[in-house]
Image (cartoon, rainbow, N blue to C red):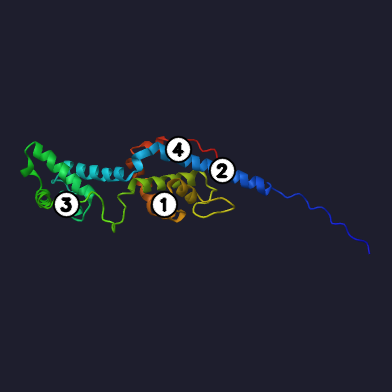
Amino acid sequence: MTKRHRQPRPPATGLPVTFAKAEIAAQETEIIRYITVMRTALGNHLSFENSRQLFEDHFFEMLVGFDPTKLDEDVLAPEDIVHLARAKHPAADRAIFRFVDKAMVVDRFQELPMPIREYFRERAAHGPMSPIYPPRTPQVVAHFIRDVWIALVMERLVRRLPGWPRYTKKKGRRSAAALVGEVFHLGEAQIRRIHEADRGLAVRVGMFYMRGYFESFDPPLNV
């Protein structure tokens, strides 16, 4: 019986495995560079204090511009902001004190809404509120700008890279959530939770809270 010689295998189709892995790694590096450039450009806009300042400014503007003759469900009334301050919301508390200080400078304290005056007298008798949120309180306010930005960049990656996996690893590629998490030092699951919770909010109000900067800043992504 003659020994059969094994025929050579036909060449594999597609890219060699090592080349494919190198290409994927290069693509991931480019995506991370893209996210990092945007995060660096936004700088301290993503900080805890900036998020809290945004809310304080918002409450203060609501107090200054409040018109009791107009009923608007989208506008916070003074009693609403007092309610937040009584619930230990530091930004609401600071906004009220700014508002009262502004009124006292021009000797108009007695013209302020009754809830504001009552809260100010009560607080003045008990000393300053803690500038931070209680440890058991969800840190939604402290991370607000960061989370909206994460949702925005996730939406942008999904739109610009429609074939890239969103949340889970696929075909050797780390997910967009994992890559964003690497830049922010957060886990893939955390990024997914933020994106799923805030992507609708990001689309509606993200550009406002980023002061129009995010949309105008768009570094090239060559992947």
34 w.r.t. 7: above or below: above
Q: For the residues marked 1 and 2, what is the alpha-carbon distance in whole angstroms? A: 22 Å
What residue appears at the point 13 percent right and 40 percent down from the top-left corner? 101
Measured Cα–Cα span from mark 3 to mark 4? 40 Å
**183 sits to left or right of 204:** right
Rounded to the nearest whole Å, what is the CA distance between mark 1 and mark 4?
A: 20 Å
Return the disc, 2 or 3, that comes first in the chain's sequence: 2
Q: Position of residue 87 (x, y in %)?
A: 20, 56
Q: Amino acid at mark 1?
A: His
Q: Earlier in the sequence, mark 1 or mark 3?
A: 3
Disc assigned to residue 195: 1
Amino acid bearing label 4 = Val
Q: Give the mark, 1 or 4, whose residue is nearer the N terminus.
A: 4
Quadrant assignment for the C terminus: top right
Tell which circle, 4 or 2, labels the residue nearer the N-terminal end: 2
Which residue, given by chain and number where applicable, does mark 2 sit on? 27
Q: Would residue 182 appear left or right of 24 to someone viewing this image? A: left
Pointer 4: what residue? 37
Q: Amino acid at mark 2?
A: Gln
Q: Residues within 10 Å of mark 4 (few under 14, many from 20)?
A: some
Amino acid identity at mark 3: Val
Q: Quadrant of the N terminus?
A: bottom right
The residue lying at 84 percent from left, 54 percent from top is: 7
Question: Which residue is under mark 3?
Answer: 82
Report the mark closest to the observer, 1 or 2: 2
Mark-to-mark CA distance, 4 and 2? 15 Å
- Residues at discs 4 and 2 in contact (Cβ within 8 Å): no
* Dot 1 and dot 2 residues touching (CB under 8 Å): no
In the displayed structure image, the side of residue 113 where residue 73 appears, left or right: right
